[in-house]
Amino acid sequence: MTSPPKLLKLKTRIVTAIVVVANVLGNSFLSRGMQSVGALISLSPVPYIRALFNPWVAVGVTLLIVWLLSHMALLSWADLSYVLPVTSIAYVLVALVGRFLLHEQVSTARWVGITLIMIGVSLVGCTSPRTTVPHDREAQP
Amino acid sequence: MKWLLVTVIVLATTAGEVLQAIGMRRHGEIHDFRPGALGRVASTLARCRYILAAMVAMAVSFFAFMALVSMSELSFAVPVTAASYIIETLFAKYLLKEHIGRTRWTGVLLVACGVALLAFE
């Protein structure tokens, strides 16, 4: 059983939005937390586990778990070569978070990069999310 | 140290995402998003070798990323790890046999150029 194209596109858009938002917020929280924890250079798991108790890190990790699960759900029907570029809109959002929330300097080259990513993402977004025969349909000819 | 971590992240993410894609394709499309149905999906996936291997790879990638953001800025760490994406697109084409048409290739290349500008300017 596979969804008709229209439903497939809608479902893809919604789950992609969850993947992207969870990724951007998760990474931002993790980064904010790790800056207060301080540099981690260790092969022992103890300092990493201790870092997980930092509240920023804990929220970041929770969001990254949401990211992982929604990413897996998306891959259950969409191509990897579709998911990768489309979820790269997260790079743009990270730059915007840096510029407007963390007041980082964003150079002209960086804005050009952001624009290229947005054009690329919208091109890939126009293609069909799935180009292979679904596994469940493959099994029953 | 920074570049060693970047290498570990890129290799582990590539392995993790390609394995996730293989495992999820074997599982088939998720239709039902109610909690009970999602629980059944989770218990099926917990027995899939590809998904278990993917989780190990993603855990390695996560802890290396945690170490990387503890010593460098987010605006460096996030774009630089996108290097995995070119390798993964090649895996998608040759291993997962996805059909990447001209529009999608153009988009992928534009995104790659954009990410490179963010990472190395």
Image: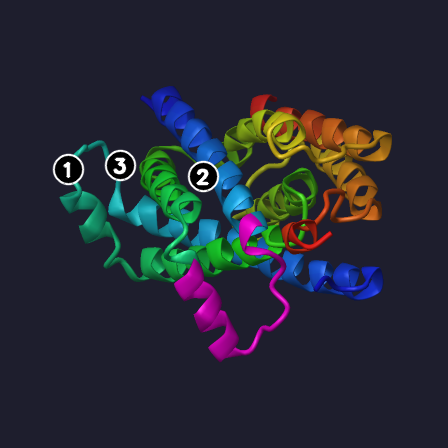
Residue B27 located left or right of residue A87: left
Badge 1 marks a residue whose secondary structure is loop
> Is A54 one of the magenta-colored residues?
no
Kindly report the secondary structure that dominates the magenta region of the rendered protein.
helix
Q: Amino acid at mark 1?
A: Ser
Q: Which residue is mark 3?
A: A39
Look at the picture and state if B36 lies above or below B58: below
Q: Are marks 3 and 2 on the same chain?
A: no
User: Residue B83: x, y in percent?
Assistant: 55, 26
User: Residue A65: x, y in percent?
Assistant: 42, 58
Q: Quadrant of the C terminus of chain B?
A: top right
Q: Which residue is mark 1?
A: A44
Whole-angstrom CA distance, mark 3 to mark 2, is 25 Å
Badge 2 marks a residue whose secondary structure is helix
Q: Amino acid at mark 2?
A: Gly
> Is B41 one of the magenta-colored residues?
yes
Instruction: Please say whether residue B12 is visible from this viewpoint.
Output: yes
- Which region of the structure is painted magenta? B26-44
Label 2, residues with CA under 10 Å away: few <14, some 14-19, many ≥20: many
What colouring does the structure picture have? rainbow
User: Residue A130: x, y in percent?
Assistant: 74, 47
Q: Is mark 3 in CB contact (under 8 Å) with mark 2? A: no
